[in-house]
């Protein structure tokens, strides 16, 4: 599949927009969830033309996902009218036709995968539509080819990476002949290459005249839109083109990507044009403050780094390093057994009975309290598997599997004690939440660890304040919240017991700009208080510009363990992961200065 970077990452509006044909039209639509007095959508009026790429932006909890569910007839308006390709979404008789023409792709593809094999899942919607078997086979082959999954047609869905599962969800939508794709943070859990593959497929579908309606917090992806709308508290507050959006985004509380913000600062109108920005920089004097801002991009991290944690030897062909050197004696001595987690020779193999997959291969490292360590790598590299060992959710069986030490003691000897010290926040909040209300969710851990009852209320209030949850949310069901709000509840439930360590899987995925800022402030506060933080993330801009140390996994092995600047150099030389544009610009500037 062609990736977005191979098409230049610059997109012109589709010439196939049909002015008079509406993909959907909402008029005076209001909606609230059962048990809630507040409206999630409040008198919403919005239209989208066929063939348009519409991005819906807004804070967590503003009503974006609810709007998409209305367009897919998963929900119906309490008031007002919602028409999808001319069909009234409130009429149950139209539900099947609407879902056939407007396909939903969720943030977590596992929420919509139902088949055992790839071809089974791609065929599911077609079988429900009573499509003849001969046509089903043709459509499956076509859709899997479009999604880059034809070679995995017979594979188990459980053997797919996160990016491949997202492509499978899209393949099913393509197979059913959808005219409109409703994308709810569909790229937020993908690594940089997986994200580009998906964006490239969106671009191809759009160029063919399909309607794209995309909810995203990744402002960088707005560059592909024909139009952007902003929703706040269930109301439409702004609508305009992508260039106008980039010009006004910050006034609405959005944080532009660092690269985009820098482009605006030096007076470049097209913030998506890397070459133009690089040429503009080259025209500036060497001592210009804008030049020095890029050249010194990592100086803040340098001030707090203790040096390279693990050295690497890049191959001359630009591939992965051929070997890793041991840490220096000075770095080795900076770790103390009473404030660290140490992993020694950890290995893990997944088996489905027919084949084995090595998820972790002799992994060894140490992390210490008072630091933010970021663990990154491609989808399927073993990151989520690794952190489940650190909280004793997985335990080592046998002498050859390795070991995990917490404060010098093997974690298998006291897994409950380890979980008392280590708070865990999963990648998908819905996998972690189970209680009837947010208050019950936070109370569970306190009761489990036998915290005195008189301390419960104070700890709960303290925890929700730290993550920005209002007290009014305590009596709501956690499953009625937005994805970002559910993630905040999960973090609060981890913090309420005051752990010494916090491990977070994709903490910034699906968060709006304000929530990201608040989360980073919280992590820095926890770090300053002596807590150890390990964040698994595909967001390299977040990791490189905020982490104290970066560990890179590839195919179950650590290929780099270094300070941010050294990691950026390694990734640039090895091309193990695609760097953010701002870091690529830093690489270019360092070669000149």
Image (cartoon, rainbow, N blue to C red):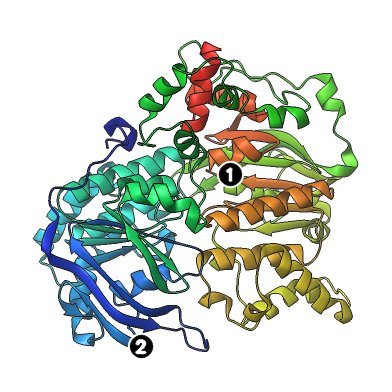
Of 498 and 588, nearer the camera is 588
**In the picture provided, is 529 more to the left or to the right than 505?**
right
Of 25 and 150, nearer the camera is 25
Residue 158 pos. (x, y %): 43, 54
Asked whether the beta carbons under mark 1 and mark 2 sit within 8 Å of each other, the answer is no
Answer above or below: position of 319 versus 382.
above
Location of the N terminus (image quadrant): top left
Q: Can residue 229 be seen from the camera position used here?
A: yes
Q: Can residue 354 be seen from the camera position used here?
A: no
**In the picture provided, is 333 more to the left or to the right than 558?**
right
Residue 313 pos. (x, y %): 60, 15
Location of the C terminus (image quadrant): top right
Using the rendered view, name the quadrant where residue 79 is placed.
bottom left
Q: CA distance from mark 1 to mark 2?
A: 43 Å
Using the rendered view, name the quadrant where residue 63 is placed.
bottom left
Residue 69 pos. (x, y %): 35, 73
Residue topped by disc 2: 78
Residue 467 pos. (x, y %): 68, 63
**SS for callout 1:** helix
Badge 2: few (under 14), some or many (20 or more) residues near its Cα, within 10 Å?
Answer: some
Q: Earlier in the sequence, mark 1 or mark 2?
A: 2
Of 322 and 452, nearer the camera is 452
Residue topped by disc 1: 383
Q: Which mark is residue 267?
A: none
**SS for callout 2:** loop
Using the rendered view, name the quadrant where residue 551 is placed.
top right
């Amino acid at each position: 599949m062609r990736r977005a970077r191979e098409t230049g990452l610059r997109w012109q509006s589709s010439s196939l927009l049909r002015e008079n044909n509406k993909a959907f039209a909402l008029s005076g639509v209001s909606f609230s969830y059962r048990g809630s007095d507040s409206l999630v959508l409040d008198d919403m009026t919005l239209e989208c033309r066929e063939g348009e790429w519409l991005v819906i932006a807004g804070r967590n909890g503003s009503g974006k996902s609810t709007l998409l569910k209305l367009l897919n007839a998963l929900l119906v308006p309490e008031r007002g009218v919602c028409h999808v390709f001319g069909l009234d979404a409130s009429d149950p008789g139209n539900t099947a036709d609407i879902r056939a023409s407007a396909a939903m792709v969720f943030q977590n593809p596992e929420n919509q995968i139902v088949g055992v094999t790839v071809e089974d899942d791609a065929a599911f919607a077609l079988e429900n539509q009573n499509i003849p078997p001969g046509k089903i086979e043709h459509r499956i082959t076509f859709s899997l080819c479009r999604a880059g999954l034809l070679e995995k047609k017979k594979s188990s869905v459980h053997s797919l990476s996160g990016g491949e599962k997202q492509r499978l969800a899209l393949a099913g939508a393509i197979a059913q002949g959808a005219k409109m794709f409703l994308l709810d943070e569909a790229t937020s859990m993908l690594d940089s290459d997986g994200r580009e593959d998906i964006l490239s497929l969106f671009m191809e579908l759009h160029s063919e005249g399909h309607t794209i309606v995309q909810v995203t917090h990744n402002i960088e992806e707005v560059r592909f839109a024909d139009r952007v709308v902003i929703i706040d508290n269930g109301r439409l507050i702004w609508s305009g083109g992508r260039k106008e959006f980039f010009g006004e985004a910050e006034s609405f509380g959005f944080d532009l990507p660092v690269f985009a913000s820098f482009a605006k600062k030096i007076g470049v109108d097209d913030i998506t044009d890397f070459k133009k920005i690089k040429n503009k920089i080259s025209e500036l004097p060497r001592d210009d403050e804008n030049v020095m801002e890029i050249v010194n991009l990592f100086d803040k991290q340098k001030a707090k780094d203790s040096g390279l944690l693990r050295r690497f030897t890049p191959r001359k062909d630009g591939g992965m390093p051929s070997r890793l050197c041991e840490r220096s004696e000075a770095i080795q001595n900076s770790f103390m057994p009473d404030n660290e987690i140490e992993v020694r020779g950890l290995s893990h193999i997944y088996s489905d009975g027919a084949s084995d997959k090595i998820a972790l291969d002799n992994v060894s490292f140490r992390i210490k309290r008072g630091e933010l360590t970021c663990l990154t790598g491609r989808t399927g590299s073993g990151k989520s598997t690794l952190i489940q060992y650190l909280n004793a959710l997985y335990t080592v069986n046998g002498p050859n599997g390795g070991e995990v030490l917490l404060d010098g003691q093997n974690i298998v000897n006291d897994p409950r004690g380890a979980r008392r010290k280590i708070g865990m926040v999963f990648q998908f909040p819905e996998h972690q939440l189970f209680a009837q209300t947010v208050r019950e969710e936070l109370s569970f851990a306190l009761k489990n660890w036998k915290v005195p009852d008189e301390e419960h209320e104070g700890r709960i209030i303290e925890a929700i304040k730290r993550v920005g949850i209002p007290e009014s949310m305590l009596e709501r069901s956690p499953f009625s919240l937005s994805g970002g709000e559910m993630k905040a509840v999960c973090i609060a439930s981890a913090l309420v017991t005051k752990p010494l360590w916090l491990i977070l899987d994709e903490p910034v995925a699906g968060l709006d700009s304000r929530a990201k800022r608040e989360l980073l402030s919280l992590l820095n506060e926890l770090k300053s208080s002596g807590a150890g933080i390990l964040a698994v993330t595909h967001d390299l801009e977040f990791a490189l510009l905020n982490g104290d140390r970066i560990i890179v996994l590839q195919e179950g092995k650590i290929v780099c363990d270094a300070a941010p600047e050294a990691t950026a150099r390694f990734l640039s030389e090895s091309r193990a992961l695609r760097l953010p544009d701002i870091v690529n610009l830093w690489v270019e500037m360092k070669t000149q200065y």
